[in-house]
Image: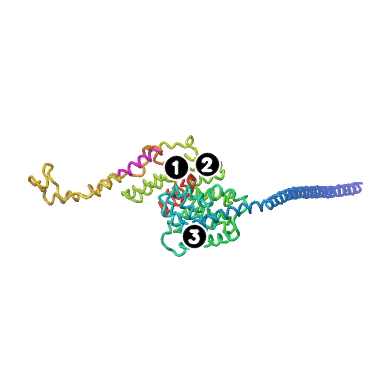
Amino acid sequence: MSTELEISTERVQKFIDDLEAQKTILSTCTQLFTALTNHFSSLQNSLSEKSQSLDAKFQSLSSTSSQTLESLSLRESSIPDREATAAVNVESQKEAALAEFQNPKTSTQLSESLKSFCRRMDSTGLMKFIVSKRKESVSLRAEISDALSEAVDPPRLVLEAVDDFVSQKIAKTGGLTDKRWASGILVQALFPEASWKEKKDKVPEFARSTKERAVKVVENWKGQLDGDEEGVGAAEAVMFLQMVVGFELRERFEEGFLRKLIVDFASRRDMAKLAAALGFDDKMGDIIDELVKSGKEIEAIYFATEAGLTERFSPVSLLKSYVRNYKWNAANILKNGHHSAAATEESHNVELSSIRATIKCVEDHKLESEFSVNNLRKRATQLEKLKADRKRSSSASGKPQNKRGHNAGSSRGSGPSAFRPAKTAKFSNAYPPFSRRNPAHSAQHSPATLYSGPYNYGSQNAFDGPAPYGSAYGLPHSQSPAAVSQQQYSHPVDNIGTAAGYRTSGSYGG
């Protein structure tokens, strides 16, 4: 009996094991079926979404094609009227130019002289005239745009002027500063700031030959920019980028080259708007990061405002960082210069320029409620007073002294002669000891003392007034401590004039 029972138990156990195996297989099949079902459902949804996307794109393409065809039809129908208007305009300008050639008038009015050169398409004479009137730059900028409209082909006139400047730059001839300034006025008048944003959606209005010539001029110019980095100023970089934007030559240059120009000369007010016009909108954040890392917090604020990234890059935080950096720079200059008179003057100049840039930035962005500049203004007034005192003392010490003194009651022609002191006394008066000849040396203070008291800045009047288009910032960048050893605090930069009222093309610091 027991044997039969053992046999029956084994059979039951085997049967249960078989059921468990079948259960596992059934569960696996169920999981595979569920996975396949989900996969095919996902594929079906994906295909459905792609089909809907294609349908939407087809509809958009159809709508765009209809609008384009309609626009082309309107343009085609307007060609006769436009041709007639252009022919009348060209004929009137031709007659005016011929009249200028036949009966040249020597007008004393600035506007008439400019129009005369433009009517004759005399780029050489126009450049010489603009250079000769450099002292009247404000009036020039106000009149140059109207004068260019009198030319038969304004783009060609400006291209000839810029081509002449580039050719002289290649030949390394003299007078490049004046040529650069005059060319900048013409380029700014041809491509004002308001036209940069319109270039993205506007149909080109230049003849094919004009654009081909612009390509040659700008490419030759790029070769000079690449090979002469030290001789390239902010004004020239701005003018180059304006040509690229104006003649729509963005695709002709590598992104890295254009971005380097923007970052290197970011202190120009134009650069933030030019960067947007060149299509760097989606990379503006990276550019701002690069500016912040290189110690150009003020420029970063203007770029962030232009790009609408002030939430990501807080202007107040950047201003605080900029103030910390320029204080550190000024103190470091004093320390490295052993608190000499030259080091003190350089330190004060760096600090004053940075303060001006800070105040101007706060006013431009209306941050007075978040960032107080009262102490900065007091400190600026204090530095201005110190600078004026140094100038007065240096001018006073530079005046020649009489070799002989005279008695107050005597004259050269009558009366007894004054008592002449001994030569030793005269020598000692003329050359006092070192401690007396250098009183400032013993009065130097440590950087901690320099900043220990509250800032004592004066009124804003010292910083007011629009900066001309051509002025580079003229302000040293307060860089991070690691970069101070390589900091250059001033760079001679050429000026480029703009039309009157283009305050935005001046420097951030004012």
Q: Residues at badges 1 and 3 in contact (C-beta under 8 Å)?
A: no
Mark 3 highlights which residue?
225
Examine the residues drawn in magenta and state their main secondary structure.
Answer: helix
Question: Which class describes the residues within 10 Å of circle 2: few (<14), some (14-19), or many (20+)?
Answer: some
Q: Mark on residue 314? A: 2
Can residue 153 be seen here? Answer: no
Question: What SS does tag 3 mark?
Answer: helix
Cα gap from disc 2 to disc 3, whole angstroms: 34 Å
Q: For this view, does 82 lie left or right of residue 447?
A: right
Residue 271 within the segment the image draws in magenta: no
Amino acid, disc 2: Ser
Q: Pointer 1: residues within 10 angstroms few (<14), some, or many (20+)?
A: many
Element under label 2? Answer: loop
User: Magenta span covers which residues?
Assistant: 376-389
Identify the image quadrant of residue 492: bottom left
**Viewed as shown, does residue 103 lie left or right of 58?**
left
Q: Position of residue 273 (x, y in %)?
A: 54, 48
The residue wearing badge 1 is 358
Colour approach in the figure: rainbow
Name the residue type under label 1.
Thr
Mark 3 surroundings: few (<14), some (14-19) or many (≥20) residues within 10 A:
some
Q: Is residue 443 visible?
A: yes
Is label 1 in a helix, a strand or a loop?
A: helix
Q: Nearer the viewer, residue 20 or 362?
A: 362
Left or right of 58? Residue 100 is left
